[in-house]
Amino acid sequence: MKVWAVFLMLYTASALVVIDSALASSCLYYFKEFDWGCGGTGQGHKMYMCRCFNVDWLGSVSNCMATQGKNQKEVTHAWKHLRTRCLQKAHVDYSVAQIEGWSTNASKYLQAPTAADKKKLVTHPLSVNSTNYAVYRRSFNEINHHVFKSQWFGWGLVLYCGAVIAIFTVLNFFKRVLKVSVVPRSLSTLFLKYMMPDIKVPGFTPFTRFDLLLMVLFTIQAVISTAVSYTVQLPNMYMKGRWFLTMDLIGYRSGIIAFSLMPVVYIFGLRNNPFCFLTGLPQTTFITYHKFVAIIMAIEAMIHTSVWTAYAIKAGPYSVWSADAYWNWGIVGTVLVYIMLFQSIGFIRNFMYELFLAIHKIFGWLFIVLMWYHCISLGWMGWVYSIIAITVYDRIIRCWKIFALNRGFTRVKFNFISENTLAITIPKSDVYDSVYKPGHHLYLNFFHTSIWYKCFQSHPFSVVSSPIQSQDEVTVYMRVKKGVSKCLSKIPTDEKGNFEVWLLIEGPYGHSVQTFNEKESLVGMAGGLGLCSLLPTFYRNPKNSILFWAINKIDDLEALHMELDYLIAQGTDVRVFLKRSDCDESSSFAEEKYKYLSVSNSRPDVNSWVEEAHALASAMGKTDLHILTCGPGLMDSDISASVYQHMSLKDDLAIHFCPKNYMW
Ligand SMILES: Cc1cc2nc3c(=O)[nH]c(=O)nc-3n(C[C@H](O)[C@H](O)[C@H](O)COP(=O)(O)OP(=O)(O)OC[C@H]3O[C@@H](n4cnc5c(N)ncnc54)[C@H](O)[C@@H]3O)c2cc1C
Ligand SMILES: *[C@@H]1O[C@H](CO)[C@@H](O)[C@H](O)[C@H]1NC(C)=O
Ligand SMILES: *[C@@H]1O[C@H](CO)[C@@H](O)[C@H](O)[C@H]1NC(C)=O
């Protein structure tokens, strides 16, 4: 019996919220003004402990619901609300049939309420004075309507994101599947030239002007959604004072909007974000949106929390409010969101990337738990279920990719191809060729006794499926940095410079490479190992394309020259630029060995690369020039500045700038 009651309490928990049933709330509020011998007109536990055992009160309230309801459905729902109220606040479980019985019984004893009934103990059931009751009903109808509207304002913001994604999806479908451009050429050039350049905001990964525009529009909609349409009139019998009423309404509005944004924040941050596939946008872009929507959500959550805190302090005593569990879970939730935002700021994140990632994930799960307890007694659980579903979905897909597509634990050979570069040779799984396309990347977890504590880290790398190497394996080139890559580089090697590590491989991710036609020209500009991200595109389109590659160490060229030789044989014009370091004598030998290598004392001038690419493509009468880049941030931004400068409306040649340096 007790278990059942608890279950029922959870199941119908939302009855605690005033908006569950306007009919029930208006009857309860109308009758609380009379003297039932409980010594007050409050709505707390103490009052219900008394009222729920007063048969006259039970009769009056249930009869009010029966007579004022529009139809039987509304009446029954109101009776259920009454049941939950007595269960939650007075711990007594009446059945709906019992409540109906009191209602019928009371109709035999009803007396019209008088002013005296408010001061003197009432010992019989009261009927409803419809003149006086009307304002109660209007009050709760309006509160309900406000909450209903807030829900739609929340949906409005979700729909905004949906609409943006739908438009991108359609454009992507035309571009990738039908291979036609629906946007007129001049318009598309205008868009590329003025909307695609990057904006750099400290703490953020660079995003485009178009992203900024989308975010500004979203912000405007969020502000409007939060600020307009407060139409509840005074007097309101739920909240008598204007101040309290306003606070209450703002609290509802901001809370519901914050809630509606939760699934958007979660889905945009997923590794297996389905919208990446649909829209053709890189995950970097969605991570930017993820951060941005999270900021808006955090602001709404802060408004919600502040408003209710101010309310509780003024209504006092605060301890009465904070006694409820949902109250405290809510506050912890808001604090958690701000901690997460704070540690996501660029320099903090990059300072301790792996720690950031671990904390971010754990807090993300913790947040779900907090919101569960925040809402279990209030309602709106649908939004909480949605983020649980999103999180579980991602985990399932990840496990499926690791264990089904990439056969789980795999022992893999590592070898040094230069002092700071490791080549990881991964044997293909049975389904590799049917699921991986050139251009995809994968994530690796490393298992080795010396770095066992890093086995939870999952790092992204580009796959190079070289046409000149064994077709049964693929290669990942890994630059040694400060984290797990550094630890791997310290593992003792055998005499040939090899060692073996168990891996969990997760993939494929990202987008496959494009194929270009006769009228399109491909130019690549890579720095260091960024070349690996461009190679798949060049294997696909080697003919008449140009590849510029800037390196700091001749080792990089030694390691990858076979790939370049292959491309040259297929018709690619390869140019490699090495910056001479002071103590480097081998470079002049190298210049003789590799005809396409030029060594100089300064960094190559990327502007001249762009100029040359543009001039050549124009001379050859091409319609489109695709410039792919992947290098260190500074190099990429120099190239992009130059590319956007070269874009012109008058030009017959359309330039497309595709940075492949996906950092987030
Ligand atoms: C799509 C994609 C493809 C990549 N391809 C290659 C490649 O082919 N070869 C290569 O050498 N590198 C590649 N990288 C970069 C590579 O993921 C990082 O260099 C590697 O994770 C660094 O590990 P670390 O622990 O030694 O780094 P740390 O020294 O701890 O961190 C260096 C930087 O690497 C980035 N980083 C670290 N961990 C992660 C992670 N789990 N997820 C995303 N970024 C992270 C962060 O920006 C961090 O600031 C690629 C990155 C992406 C996003
Ligand atoms: C019927 O209502 C009257 C008045 O409220 C009350 O005294 C009586 O106990 C009720 N009878 C039953 C069976 O509930
Ligand atoms: C309802 O209450 C008002 C004012 O309290 C009173 O004037 C009116 O007569 C009452 N109506 C009925 C039907 O009792």
Image: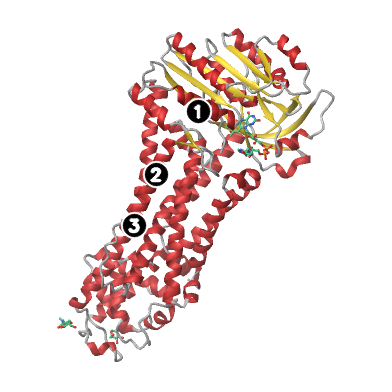
Counting from the top left corner in percent of width and height, residue 265 is at: 47, 47
Would you say 378 lies left or right of 484 here?
Answer: left
Viewer-proximal residue among 99 and 52: 52
Mark closer to the chain start, 2 or 3:
2
- Asked whether disc 2 touches disc 3, contact meaning CB atoms under 8 Å apart, the reply is no
Viewer-proximal residue among 566 and 594: 594
Task: Examine the rendering and report whether any part of residue 436 can be seen.
Answer: no
Residue 490 appears in which quarter of the rendering?
Answer: top right
Image quarter where the C terminus lies is top right
Mark 2 residue type = Val
Residue lying farthest front? Answer: 601
Would you say 465 lies left or right of 86 here?
Answer: right
Q: Return the mark for residue 227.
A: 3
Residue beneath disc 1: 641
Counting from the top left corner in percent of width and height, residue 65 is at: 26, 72
* Distance CA(mark 2)–CA(mark 3): 16 Å
Determine the secondary structure under disc 1: helix
Q: Which label sits in the foreground, 2 or 1? A: 1
Determine the secondary structure under disc 3: helix
Mark closer to the chain start, 2 or 1:
2
Quarter holding ligand 2: bottom left
Counting from the top left corner in percent of width and height, residue 376 is at: 46, 62
315 shown above or below 648:
below
* Distance CA(mark 2)–CA(mark 1): 24 Å
Mark 3 residue type = Ala
Viewer-proximal residue among 214 and 95: 214
The structure residue drawn at horizontal position 55% and vertical position 18%, both measured from the top left corner, is 609
Dot 2 crowding, Cα within 10 Å, few <14, some 14–19, many 20+? few
Mark 1 residue type = Ala
* Distance CA(mark 3)–CA(mark 1): 40 Å
User: Is label 1 within 8 A of ligand 1 (CB to nearest ligand atom)?
Assistant: no
